[in-house]
Amino acid sequence: MLLTSVILVLREVLEAALLLSILLAMSHYLELKTRWIFMALAGGILGSMVYGAGIGTVSDTFDGMGQELLNATMQFAIYGLLLLVGILLILNRRGERRYLPLLQWSMVLAVTLATLREGSEVYVYLMAFRYQADLLQSVLLGAFIGGGIGFSIGALFYYLLVGLPRKRRLIVALTLLALVAAGLCLQATQLLEQADWLPAQSPLWDSSAVLSENSVLGQLSYALLGYEATPTRNVVAAYLCGLLLMTALLLLAWAKSRSQP
Amino acid sequence: MSIRLFLLVALLSTITLVNFIAALHGYRASMEEAQRLFDRQITGTALLLAALPIDRTAPLVVEENDLQAFQVRSADGQLLMRSDNAPTTPIGDVQEGFSEQNFSGFRWRVYNHSAAGGRSIRVAERVDLRFRLADEVVLQSVMPILFGLPVAGLLIWLVIGRGLASLRQLASELRHKRAEDLTPLTLAAPPEELLPLVRSTNALLERLQASFERERRFSADAAHELRTPIAAIQVHADNLANLLRANDAAAPESLRQLQESISRMAHLVEQMLNLFRVTPEHYPARFEPIDLHRMAREVITELYPAFARRGQEIELQGHAAIIRGDRFALVLLLQNLLNNACKYTPEGGRVVVDVKQQEGVVLLRVQDSGPGMPAEERERVFERFYRVGGDRHESRAPGCGLGLSIVHHIAELHQARVSLDTSSLGCQQSPGLAVSVIFPLQVSK
Amino acid sequence: MESRIKRWLLRTDPRNLAVAVVVALVVTLVPALPAQAAHPEFQLEIRDHLFYPSVLKVPANTKVRLIVINRDTTPEEFESYELNREKVIMGGQKAVIFIGPLAPGEYPFFGEFNPKTAQGKVIVE
């Protein structure tokens, strides 16, 4: 059970932790207070408990597709928030300190939603083994290891971003943000396919032999780049559209902030 | 960002990552090895069953433990023997070797073995049980890595603290340095990494000290050099005035203004010299017990004509209070305070000097009924050459803006504190000024 | 290269660009919005952390409606990397998952909460 726990928890923690470290690094660039993360994490954990406890009810809505639709909505909402964060970051890149409350709240909401979404699965999983004493130890140990690996990668990633040279760090952070955001579009599209709200096709390619989604590296690529071993046409299209839309809007914001005196 | 927190988090993360992935790898490898062992156990059972001479028409049902189940069939597919937990239908894949299948409410790993004579032997083991058995054993080897983590964290915390001790020492030495203290930093055996910092800081302090010294000496020298020619000009101007008076000619207005300007300049030079004389770092103070009350009376007596000329009332309150101080400096302090009071209080006003000992301090307070000083100006008046309202002070009193700087220096020399407040003699239109100098009774050296 | 893009962006009206992106999105995604045709139905059950049946045969190149009923009291997560599917099914609950259309082949799935025993595969023929 240890390995199962590790993989399950690692996958969920990694996604939230990477997003958190990117946003935290951005806060650091703008010299904002980082107290918001406690609020976001507390909100996310509380929310994941509520969602985890009510997931059965949610599933029964929309002809049994409530889970998929709610998750997809959350992913798209996070995408929108990240887009907003990116644009506000660009508008603040010379230390203008504009729209800071909006920026902070976008970050809080994005992290809260991400934690809520990833945390609910961990919550349901851990609750399932609550009364199985013989397995509980192994499950908790695995969860601990998975969480440990996820948070460690997040922490090291954060220091990597914070330590980047001043000239390049904004570009790097924005690129990462765009990739993560595009990954969210991809996941949401997949959920809509699963719910039959979007048509599905055969996968365009199968790269599971090169990089399995099941491995730690595969999980990392999944969380950071939205890696998918067997994507369908729509999923690839959604990824590219998400990426393009974000890149276009960010470049526009950049051009606008440059043309201003 | 704290270096200590950064190092702790970064190191602990690295250790966690490396250790946990290693533990995971070890766990996975051990589990695979355990599965191989179980598989060999299955093949052993299969071979044992193959060697059994069974010749029956009705199938033999044998009792078995939870873990294993088996079936033995003849070449024509007839069930010869089975364990009590195995079904009568064939289990496992048709092909020889290992496969996985659900039956009897569990998932099994099944080994299909064709023995000599076409007999087929199928042995199954419960997947969940063998996994759980292996898991229990392997977990014991993973545990220590986890328990080691908090210990590693604590050790790292302590080691980093030790490593940063010299940095902390340097920071505290810089923090406790007094503003005018320009002596070099002394760090016992600074580590290699801090050596450049200590060196460049000390070089900076040295340069600062030298430039302070140059500035001070230049101003003092300049003031000193100016004294003689000013005195000469003063004498010549007086002579000119006397000459004109002797010839019964009226002295022109410009000569009167010239004389006034000369006396202001003489005053300025005198004040500058006083200021540099009482600079705390350079003043050769000779401390002795002094009765401040008595000294105040002497200075008031000396300056009384000035007050009388302006029709001002001056009063000394309080009682004898002995402090350790430098006589010359304290007289200078009192003169400056009283001169200011006289200058800035309108004609016919009141000035009260108060000396008393209270709660471990000696308080000297000079209050007047003048216009006072706005609160926001009170910090700046100690700066050199700063005057409230610039040169267009409403009192039109001539001054050079050094008096309170001198007072400040002398107070510092005696480790005393100067504070400015509104006066109790004041009224709504002119709140008055109260200058308090608080001398500590115990002077630390 | 980068500066050329920026120059182009500066010259382009932002509204044109936004319109272009939205059009691109619509063109790619809309061609097949819910075509709620009747899909063949298949049923899976989870009992004691086991899938019944553990081998499911479905037709090739057809979208299939998979109904998974969890008869256990504990939750399970239906998961398949090959099918790109993932869904939490609480104890005693019924879930609907659409899969396919798929090319012929084997597609393993498992219960993520009990992956050792809850295993199965979809065989597409």
Image (cartoon, rainbow, N blue to C red):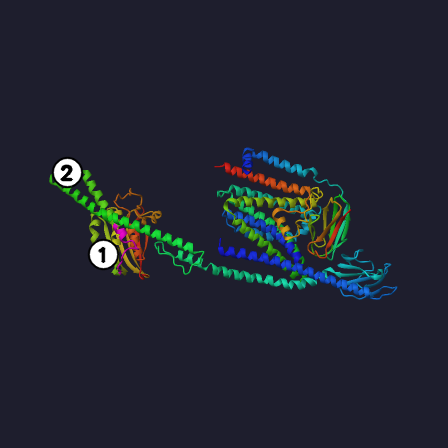
Residue contact between numbered discs 2 and 1, judged by CB atoms under 8 Å:
no
Magenta segment, which residues?
A: B273-287
Q: Residue at x 56, y 42 (%)?
A: A84
| C17 vs B294: above or below | above
Residue where numbered disc 2 is placed: B250
Q: Name the chief secondary structure element in magenta.
A: loop
Instruction: Say which element carries label 1.
Output: helix
| C53 vs B141: above or below | above
The quarter of the picture where residue B17 lies is: bottom right
Query: What's the distance in space between the residues labelled 2 and 1, CA to CA?
Result: 41 Å
Give the farthest residue toward the front.
Answer: B116
Was residue B20 drawn as part of the magenta stretch in this picture? Answer: no
| Residue A60, horizontal then vertical, whole percent | 70, 49
Q: Tell me which chain the residue with mark 2 is part of.
A: B
Residue where numbered disc 1 is placed: B297
| Residue A163, horizontal then vertical, whole percent | 51, 50
